[in-house]
Amino acid sequence: MLSSHKKVLWQIVFMMIMLPAFLLGHLPSSLHAQDAASFYKGKVVSFVVGFSPGGGVDVSSRLMANTMGKYGNCSVVVRNMPGAGGILGLNHVYTADPDGLTVMIAPLGLTEVAQLLKSPGVKYDCRRFNWLGRFNTEPQVLVTGNNSPYKSLDDVRKAKTVFSTGAEPTARASLAILITAEAIGLDNLKVIYGYPGSAEQILALIRGEADLYSPSLGTYLRQKKELRPLLVIERKRVADIPDVPALGELSIKKESKDLVEAFLSIWDIGLSVITTPGVPPERVRFLREILAKSLQDKELLAKADKLDMSLNPLPGDQVEKLVKNALGLSPEDLKKLDSIISVKYKK
């Protein structure tokens, strides 16, 4: 048996070993925040864009990058990485070093639906991303070119065949058009895939290479001189274009109502910023804080207003709940969605 002297000695040694670890685990959150702020000071953060320059996500990313850099005391550099409708960028962020130096706007709709349908190339699980927060959510608009012969949705219905652009089947704009076509019976629709971003798709309408596209409301408003709106893909009309009917006003096929509602619920996730799985919690909190501060920045708000971009923030923890709910589509709806995307409207 150890003598009392040796017991005391061992207790002292044990405390010397364990006390630093104990204290580290019980540091005040303010000290963790200071550590995160110190880490980001002077660092370069990559803001990945899964599309080509000039589109809605690219514009939004550049708007956010400068302001986040200001509040994070770091440099935030936009890096365009187009491919597979945004999947290439998502995979990059998912597999990046978990240091919190890579962020991205998760492509709305594609992020969740591509995973649900096990689309080729998907290497991520969107439930494992760290969701930093939503900065806006806006409906899609079904548009044609100003020089198009189609003046209304009825004109589109009467056509023998109409062609829509698309990046890839689960991309945001593609999903909007496919769900709309299925909901209102546009069986004459064929989608041409392979466009890298919204800028190229709008150009295709201007040139007459395609008939339809579905940009976000903000993208439409920025390009409205070249585009004619036919339908707002939302439950109700929107104030920016009050004369344009909404999908919710139309007669939707009975068998498509659940799918339409699920699709519109996914839209509630909006454009949200993510970072890599495994980033230390204090850095995730810091990124969430600088994103929240950015969304209250007067200069950013003024620029967003000039860009016809409506902000509708939501904290990261609430966005995470929406993402988990979005993955709850029934097997029947998933099967129907897969058929719509993979077979029915493909050119």
Image (cartoon, rainbow, N blue to C red):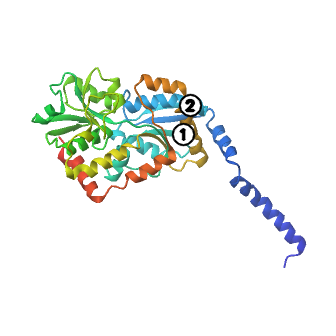
- Answer few, some or many: residues within 10 Å of disc 1's Cα (few below 14, many 20 plus, some between 14 and 19): many
- Answer few, some or many: residues within 10 Å of disc 2's Cα (few below 14, many 20 plus, some between 14 and 19): many
Q: Amino acid at mark 1?
A: Leu
Q: Which quadrant of the figure contains the N terminus?
A: bottom right
The residue that appears at 89% across and 74% down in the rendered structure is 4
Question: Which of pointers 2 and 1 lies earlier in the amino acid sequence?
Answer: 2
Task: From the image, tell me which residue sits under label 2.
Answer: 69
Q: Which percent across, then down, holds residue 215?
A: 31, 32
The residue that appears at 41% across and 30% down in the rendered structure is 58
Mark 1 lies on a secondary structure that is loop
Q: Which percent across, then down, holds residue 176?
A: 28, 40
Q: Which percent across, then down, holds residue 117?
A: 31, 52
Question: Residue 163: which numbered mark, if any?
Answer: none
Q: Quadrant of residue 11?
A: bottom right
Q: Is residue 150 visible?
A: yes
Mark 2 lies on a secondary structure that is helix
Residue 115 versus residue 175: which sits nearer the camera? Answer: 175
Task: From the image, tell me which residue sits under label 1.
Answer: 101
Q: Quadrant of residue 193?
A: top left
Q: Amino acid at mark 2?
A: Gly
Q: Which percent across, then down, holds residue 161?
A: 12, 36
The residue that appears at 27% across and 55% down in the rendered structure is 333
Residue 211 versus residue 73: which sits nearer the camera? Answer: 211
